[in-house]
Image: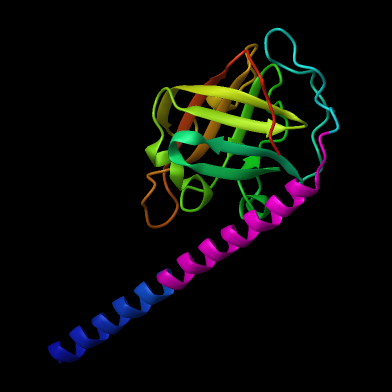
Amino acid sequence: MRTWLITICMWLLMASGSFLLVLGGMDYWESHKGQNEVSEEWQQLTPDGQAGRPSSSGTVPRVAPPPPGAAVARLTIPRLNAVLYVVEGADNRNLKRGPGHLTGTVLPGEEGNCVIAGHRDTHFRILKDIQKGDEVILSRDGHEFRYKVDDTQIVLPTNTASLKPTDAPVLNLVTCYPFYYVGSAPKRFIVHAALDPTPLQAVR
């Protein structure tokens, strides 16, 4: 009887492990496919100067965000050799395609708080290796904007300070935490960065 129970338990564990492996593989495939699609959309965009000419502070005038799901920006973290394409909107559908710009916050390079969220187990897994002083470059509308990481935090989901409007041009990257966790991760990992006042010319 005991041997029979052990055998059943072993089969259940193997089945559960296989199921989780398949789910993980599907998530990875969907995220990879989504980034390819957004990358193609990005390449078809032409710099139209919509963002306007950067001011002496390095910021550009505020404009209306693109429609949900549209390509917004290219996000590069040079030290981590990471290049990601950001979409508008941070609902589950959009986050499968790439990091999502939180609608209602400013776009990259504008005066205020730009918030970009991503899944910890796909696109924003790279944030586990980010360090203070790292450069985050966001490209859009023919310009590149350099942000420098000045802080990282681990907070509870009820702590929404990183989503609030600011006067200064800042960037907050948000993902769930811990990075390696089975199920719904209970905390949030926040990367805070400030805009360098000297914009770069974008290379598309």
Predominant secondary structure in magenta?
A: helix
Residue 69 visible? The answer is no
> Which quadrant does the N terminus fall into?
bottom left
Using the image as rendered, state which of residue 63 and residue 2 is in the foreground: 63
Q: Is residue 79 visible?
A: yes
Query: Quick check: is 23 in the magenta stretch?
Result: yes
The answer to if 1 sits in the magenta stretch is: no
Decide: is 21 above or below 196: below
Extreme residue in the left direction: 2
Nearer to the camera, 130 or 4: 130
Q: Dividing the image into 4 quarters, which one contains the C terminus?
A: top right
Q: How many marks?
A: 0
Task: Give the magenta range.
Answer: 21-47
In this picture the colour scheme is rainbow
| Above-or-below relation of 179 to 15 | above
Residue 130 sits in quarter:
top left
| Vertical position of residue 68 compared to residue 113: above or below | below
- Residue 195, image quadrant: top right
Tell me where residue 186 sits by quadrant: top left
176 w.r.t. 106: above or below:
below
Q: Whole-percent x and y of residue 75? A: 60, 37
Location of residue 18 in the rendering, given as x and y in whole percent from the top left corner = 39, 76
Picture coordinates of residue 84, whole percent (x, y): 59, 45
Residue 98 x/y as whole percent: 62, 49
Q: Residue at x 69, y 23 (%)?
A: 109
Left or right, 45 with respect to 128, comes to right
Residue placed furthest toward the top: 56
| Residue at the image position 54 percent from the left and 33 percent from the top | 173
